[in-house]
Amino acid sequence: MNGTIYEQIERAIEQIQTGEVEEGLGQLRGMLAYARQDPEVAFQLADIFYELGHLDTALTLLLELEPFFHDVSTDMQIEIRALRAEMLIDVGQLDQAMGELLQCLELEPDHIGVSVLLADLYLMQNLPEVACRYLERILETHEDEPDVAFILSELYVDLGEWEKALDLFEQLKGTEYEQRVAISKGNLFSQMGRFEEAYTLFQAVRAADPVSEEALLGCAVTALQLDQGQVAIELCDQLLALDEDHLGAYQVKGEALQKEDRLDAARTVFEQALSRNEHEDTIYLKLVELHFLMDDLEQAKNYLKHLFALDEQHEQGKEWQARLYDSRLN
């Protein structure tokens, strides 16, 4: 019977993949009654429905598997609970998801996938330090886990634990993450004021991958930090040739032009950025600043009005409001 069911599942998936979506879904729904008597079939169908975007059906199937937990293997129970946790996260039920994952760790304390998912959940709850502890625990028992080491290194950067991040970067040399580590390390060196080293790292990535947008942006940012404004502008132009909507390239190019006192050109660049993203507060702030520097206070005030439409309590916006008011008085 099971073999027949799995063959039916495969045929239904083939129908969906070839465009007969409703027919395939109908076949899958027709198997639900049988699936409720077989946890393995139910799990497979739940995974399929989840992938197809039918979250309610998938979650219902998995929740109905609770009575089978004393019959299935520990590995199967962990798989069911972990997938349930992913779905519960998607519907915003974070506490219930947490409960599922903690029960998984009771069954297998060193389960890597569950620990990573639990770390993600703590990050969603703005608890990065707790997330770090779970990832650190994985590396204590499983040293050769580059996926976990890379995630943890990024967390250390965010938390300002720079030396710990650098230690993990060294451990990731020679792994599939080596190029991404070079980008992260370059960004970190830039934050630390080690601009020459950062620039060298970004250049090395560009040598290996000339169209790496991250490396191009990193080079442009560090060139600007090294007072090489024209180099930064040229790098941004190369990046915009690859991606004409790259917001970071517009922002760095605008900053470089402003630094060279080419205010009108900088204004044009930030206006181009604004035409591609009308919801970025930093662009409005730069346009307020540039028009203020160009003595066009009315236009500065106009952009400030747009900024307050995004966030009426914007702190830097209020500072500019006071500054413009003082300018009018004077």
Image (spheres, rainbow, N blue to C red):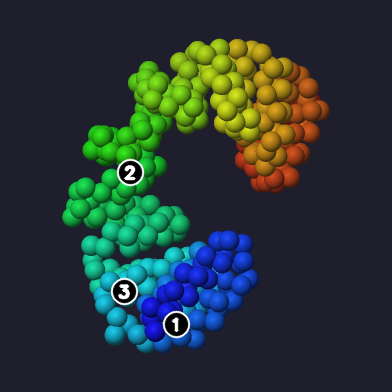
**Residue 230, located in which quarter of the rendered image?**
top right
Compared to residue 184, the image places residue 27 above or below, namely below
- Image marks 3 and 2: residues in contact by CB distance under 8 Å: no
Label 1: which residue? Answer: 35
The x and y percentages for residue 86 are 44, 65
Element under disc 2: helix
- Whether residue 85 is visible to the viewer of this picture, yes or no, is no
Tell which tag, 3 or 2, sits nearer the viewer: 3
Image quarter of residue 16: bottom right
Badge 2, how many Cα within 10 Å: few under 14, some, many 20+?
many
Residue highlighted by disc 2: 150
- Distance in Å between CA atoms under marks 3 and 1: 15 Å
Foreground pick, 145 / 99: 145
Of residues 240 and 8, the one nearer the viewer is 8
In the figure, 237 relative to 247: above or below? above
Q: Earlier in the sequence, mark 3 or mark 2?
A: 3
Residue 76's mark? 3
Which residue reaches farthest right?
298
Percent of width and height locating residue 235: 53, 19
Q: On residue 19, which mark appears?
A: none
Q: Amino acid at mark 2?
A: Phe
Question: Mark 3 is on which residue type?
Answer: Met
What residue sits 61% from the left and 72% below the top?
A: 23
User: Percent from the top left, x then y, of residue 252?
Assistant: 57, 25
Helix, strand or loop at mark 1 = helix
